[in-house]
Amino acid sequence: MLKIFEALTLARCLQLTEITVPEVVDVRETVTLSCSYDMGTHKLNSVKWYKDEREFFRYSPMMPKSLMFFDVDGVTVLQNSTVQICNQFMCSIQLHKLNIRSSGSYRCEISGDAPEFKLAHGVGNMTVAGKFCTCSTSV
């Protein structure tokens, strides 16, 4: 009887099933960040992406403006990308215009809707490598 209860409890849980953040990328690349999740019996409230604990992207399917972008140093989301897909199962976004400040810790956080607002998250670290131009032009 306990095993049946455990199986029912697990089926109801909101859980992040996978997060993909490339470990090392070339500064010239466009990179894809993605996370997959199982909402269990919960309804998706939002998916948020953070870099070093600062939110830079939000998908809220129940809001009139379902996609929101926030300014974070070193992070530029490629808007209107064909790879950008967020739904009740996964969220995939692309970053471009990478620079040395793009290196850091990236977190995908999913939240269920009322009344519980359950949270789950995953983290991946990305290092941007390559030649960075720090020279200035003189007039």
Image: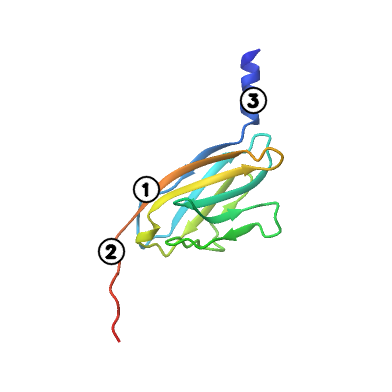
Q: Position of residue 105 (x, y in %)?
A: 42, 49
The relative height of residue 9 versus residue 89 in the rendered view (above or below) is above
Q: Callout 3, which amino acid?
A: Thr
Q: Position of residue 63 (x, y in %)?
A: 70, 55
Q: Badge 3: how crowded within 10 Å, few (<14), some, or many (20+)?
A: few
Instruction: Report the residue at 57% width, 63% height from top.
Output: 80
Quadrant hosting residue 41:
top right
Element carrying mark 3: helix
Q: Callout 2, which amino acid?
A: Lys
| Labels 1 and 2 touching (C-beta < 8 A) | no
The residue pinned by badge 3 equals 9
Instruction: Report the residue at 62% width, 32% height from top.
Output: 13
The residue pinned by badge 2 equals 131
What distance separates the C-alpha of mark 3 from that of mark 2?
Answer: 50 Å
Q: Which numbered dot is residue 54?
A: none
Q: Callout 1, which amino acid?
A: Glu
Q: Which numbered dot is residue 23?
A: 1
Q: Is residue 2 left or right of residue 93?
A: right
The C terminus lies in quadrant? bottom left
The N terminus lies in quadrant? top right
Closer-to-camera residue (107/34): 107
Instruction: Choose the circle earlier in sequence order: 1 or 3.
Output: 3
